[in-house]
Image (spheres, helix red, strand yellow):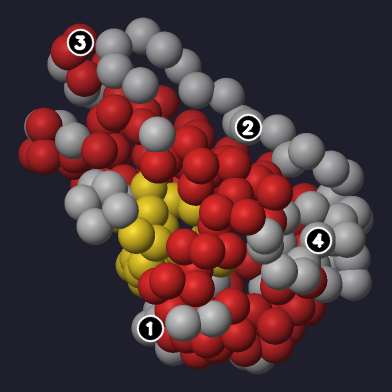
Amino acid sequence: MKKYELPPVPYSYDALEPHIDARTMEIHHTKHHQTYTDKLNAALEKCPPEIQEKDVLEILSNIGQVPADQKGAINFNGGGFDNHRIFWNNMKPNGGGEPGGSIADAINTSFGSFSEFKEKFSSTTALIQGSGWGWLVYNPSSKKVEYKSMPNQTSPRTEGLVPVLGCDVWEHAYYLKYQNKRPDYISAWWNVVNWDDAASRFDKAKQ
Ligand code: MN
């Protein structure tokens, strides 16, 4: 059986300072992401071989095929494994600004303008009740980008949507620095968005 390992963060834990603090990054990666990875492996061990041999992305995209006794664990921990793997790459030091090229065109088509997209993403993500993620996703059915809130660690892939850009609004993502001020964290997060990574996910999803 394939065993997943903790995916790397492609920069140092203090690289996103002052927007995201080093201690939060370290705990988020070495404790939270590690736990999702370990628990994904543990859940897969209890699955039949025909599930075990599939890649986690394929499993998440066909979550209904997972046996009922492991479905919740795979949905949560497989989602947590993949969401955070995307999240680290969705950010970079000296990021932010606005995208260009085809993703910018897609955002304008779906939201009217970049500023309208940013406002909708920020305000809706800030209002997610409890733990979850705000996502810019590509919908292969409509061939458009959309905003999607997802609860807990449920991956957009479970709804046939391709993650492009995600913002983790679990308290573990911001509480040490921002405490209850989730909107302040989201405002700061825009400064570290890696639009090159989001654009490459979008371009790949369209193919
Ligand atoms: Mn997280």
Left or right of 1 in this view: 198: right
Q: Position of residue 82 (x, y in %)?
A: 47, 41
Residue 73 sits in quarter:
top left
Q: Earlier in the sequence, mark 2 or mark 3?
A: 2
Q: Which residue is labeled 2 in the image?
A: 7
Q: CA distance from mark 4 to mark 3?
A: 42 Å
Residue 151 appears in the figure: yes
Disc 2 to disc 4, C-alpha distance? 21 Å
Amino acid at pointer 3: Pro
Q: Earlier in the sequence, mark 1 or mark 2?
A: 2
**Residue at the image point whose x is 11% and y is 32% from the top:** 65
Q: Which residue is mark 3?
A: 49
Q: Which residue is mark 1?
A: 129
Can you identify the residue that label 4 sits on? Answer: 95
In the rendered view, tell whether residue 198 sits above or below residue 108: above
Residue 16 location (% of width, % of height): 85, 60
Say if mark 3 contacts mark 1, CB within 8 Å: no
Q: Is residue 153 above or below residue 189?
A: above
Mark 4 or 3: in front is 4
- Dot 1 falls on a residue whose secondary structure is loop
Q: Identify the secondary structure beneath mark 3.
A: helix
